[in-house]
Image: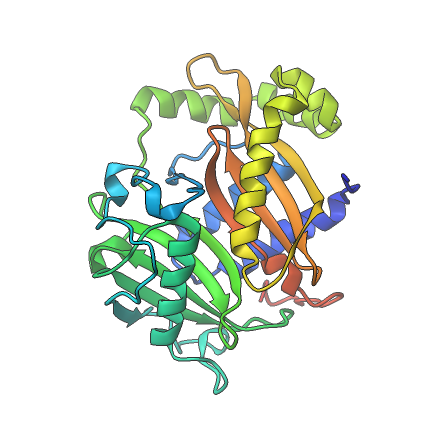
Amino acid sequence: MKKARNKGKEIMKVVAICVLSIGLFGAGFIAFNRSIFAAAINGTQALPLETASVTAPLNPSSQQSPGEELQTEPTVDVFTPPTLTVIGSPALNQHTNNTVSAHAMSMEEAAQIGALYIWDIFGECIDGMYVEMLFGAWPGLSRTYWMGGVARSMAGFDFEDDTEYDLFRFVIDAVTGLRIDISPGFRPPTMTPEEMDIFSEWRGSETRRDWQIVWQDMNTNERLAYLGLSHEDIEPHLQVARDYAARQFNTSTVVYESLSFELWATTNLTTGKMVFGGIMAAIEDDAGREAMISICENGNLRHISTQFSDLIPGFYYGGNGLG
C-alpha cells in the first residue's frame, strides 16, 4: 500500500544526506546527493556533472558491462575476493568525525565487503582496482561508517582529471558491514556548450520557479497526467526498485507492501520542456530500515541509501554548522 509521505520528513532526509556527504569524496558527491534528493521534493533533475547509471542485472553472471567505461573482466558465477590497492583518504584521521574508532574493522576488510556489495548490486568485479577509504562518525547518527570510492588508478579520485574517474561509491557500517549506501561514480560532463547555455538559462528562469511551485502542489496522479504517463508505465521502474531492495537488504527481509514512490522530472534541453526523469522509491525491510532508491527514466540505477534510518530523533547540530 502507498503510505502518506510527510514533506517535513523528506526535507530532513535531504539535509541528512548532505551532512553525511561532507568531506567524503569532494564537492561533486555533495552536489549529486543534494540534487537527487531534492528531486523527490521539487521534481527537477538536471546535473551538469553527469553520473553513470547501470541497469539492474537480474542475473549478474549473464549480463554484459553497462558501458565501455565500466568494462572489466567477465563476471564470474561466484564472488571471489579481488586483489585491491586500498588507500586512506587524505581526510582520514584528520578530524574527530573521520578518526577511526577502536571498534571499527580495518579499511582493508571494509574494502573487501564493499567489493562484494558492488558485485551483488552491479555484477561488476573490481579486481586490480584502487579503493580510497574514509571513516565517518557524525554526531546525531547511530552508527559509524566506512566509505569507499573505486577507480582504476589514483587519478580517478582527482576531479580535475577528465580522463580518469571513479567507477563506484559505497558506504557500509564500520563495525558490522551492513550495507548503507551505493551508487555509480561520476563521469565528465557530456553537455555541449549550447546545452549548457540552455540549462543555465532554464535553471535561473521564472518559468522554472513557477513550474516547481505547480509541481509541488500536484498529487501523484496529477504528475503522471502532466508527464503523459500511467501507473502501468511506472510499474517496470517499481519492479527494478524492488529487485535492488532485495540486494540492499541482504541480511533482512524486504517488506514489499511498504513501497511508495515520488516522480521526478528533467529538462529536455532541446525543447526546454519538463519530461519524465525517473522515480525515487522508498521501501522498508522487516527491521524498519528504509531504502531510498533512485531509478532513472531508462530503468537504470542512480543511488541507493538507507542512511536516513540512522538519524537519532531530535538531535540538534547547533550553531557551528551541520555535523
Residue at position x 29%, y 41% in the image: 65
Residue at position x 38%, y 58% in the image: 25
Q: Where is residue 104 in the image (x, y as percent from the top left)?
A: 47, 81
Q: Quadrant of residue 141?
A: bottom right
Q: Is residue 73 left or right of residue 186?
A: left
* Viewer can see residue 148: no
Residue 223 drawn above or below residue 167: above
Which residue in the rendered view is the most extreme toward the front?
77
Instruction: Quarter of the image for the C terminus: give it.
Output: bottom right
Residue at position x 25%, y 41% in the image: 69
Q: Is residue 105 left or right of residue 166?
A: right
Q: In this view, does 159 lie to the left or right of 209?
A: left
Asked whether 70 or 212 is in front, the reply is 70
Asked whether 83 or 225 is in front, the reply is 83
Q: Position of residue 13 (x, y in %)?
A: 65, 52
Q: Position of residue 185 (x, y in %)?
A: 36, 48
Which residue in the rendered view is the most extreme toward the right?
4
Q: Where is residue 169 in the image (x, y as percent from the top left)?
A: 40, 55
Instruction: Quarter of the image for the N terminus: give it.
Output: top right
Q: Quadrant of residue 50?
A: top left
Q: In which quarter of the image is residue 261?
A: top right
Count all numbered tags in the image, as a single digit. 0
* Viewer can see residue 116: yes
Residue 108 drawn above or below residue 272: below
